[in-house]
Image: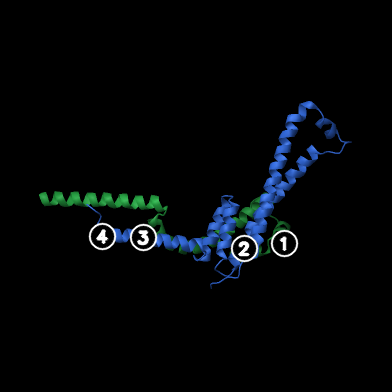
Amino acid sequence: MVPALSFLAKVLAGLITAAGLDQLTKHGYMPQATYIKAALKALEKDDLDEAIRNYKLSVKKWRPSQRSEVTAEIISSAISLRLAKLESRLAELQAILHPPWYSLQYWRNLLPKNRDRLEQLRQEQEGFAEAMRVLQKLQAKLEENDKVPQGN
Amino acid sequence: MRKIAKTTAAGGAGFLAGLLLEKGLESLTGLDFVDGLFAVSGSILAALSVNRDLVEAAARNIEQMFGKDPLEITESEWRQFKETNPKTAEWLEKALKV
């Protein structure tokens, strides 16, 4: 009661094809459009890491094309937009947390009833600063010089 | 009649064993070889639809940049976008035949 030999051969062929394709995909040998599409899909899902990884794969074995360059610019622009939003929020928080001594806000901050709220804002500020550092790292990673393409 | 029953039983057992083997291999290797076979045709389809994806991604960036639909941006906003994203703007102009 074992499966027919021809069936096993088909299973094996399918398995080898899948494993081969998996390795080709991992090492950047699939068509460039495959990686560009994956990068744009990841960007749509807000997964910047995955978007950059796929973009890097798209130029690992292939020469940069107009499409890959546009993709890099789109990813970079998406990161810049997020950085700008974070910067603006950080500036708002900075104005609340560290106002000049002659402002009303400075004296309001000294009131005990505002202590909890200020602590929350401080934590929010730290979180945003950390997010900015991550985004800056991602942007630097994206802008790293690509290796000289080996294929095509 | 006995022969038909025997053949059906053998076929059914073979099918089940094959199915178990397929699922077992998939769970062991984490690979779906049916998907693997389709990956080749998938990459061809990807090449065809990537242009549309680029336009959509650029449109999302424009929307986030100006807070409005790309169709509603003004001439000066477009120039501003073009300044910061020259390659994307050029691509869009070509793709949309502006």
Chain hosting mark 2: A
Q: Is residue A82 left or right of residue A105?
A: left
**Is there a contact, CB below 8 Å, between mark 1 and mark 2?**
no
Q: Quadrant of residue A140?
A: bottom right
- From the image, state whether disc 2 or disc 4 is nearer to you: 4
Disc 2 residue type (three-letter): Val
Chain letter, colour blue: A
Residue A14, disc:
3
| SS state under label 3 | helix
- The residue lying at 66 percent from left, 56 percent from top is A139
Q: Quadrant of residue A53?
A: bottom right
Q: Colour of chain B?
A: green
In the image, residue A151 sits, relative to residue B40, either above or below, namely below
- The residue lying at 55 percent from left, 62 percent from top is A57
- On the image, the x and y values in percent for residue A120 come to 71, 34
Disc 1 residue type (three-letter): Glu
Disc 4 residue type (three-letter): Leu
Q: Is residue B97 visible?
A: no
**Which residue is under mark 4?**
A5
- From the image, state whether disc 2 or disc 3 is nearer to you: 3
Residue that protrudes farthest toward the left in the picture: B1
- The residue lying at 77 percent from left, 29 percent from top is A114
- On the image, the x and y values in percent for residue A41 come to 54, 54
Residue B52, disc:
none
For the residues marked 3 and 1, what is the alpha-carbon distance in whole angstroms? 49 Å
Choose the circle earlier in sequence order: 2 or 4: 4
Residue A70, disc:
2
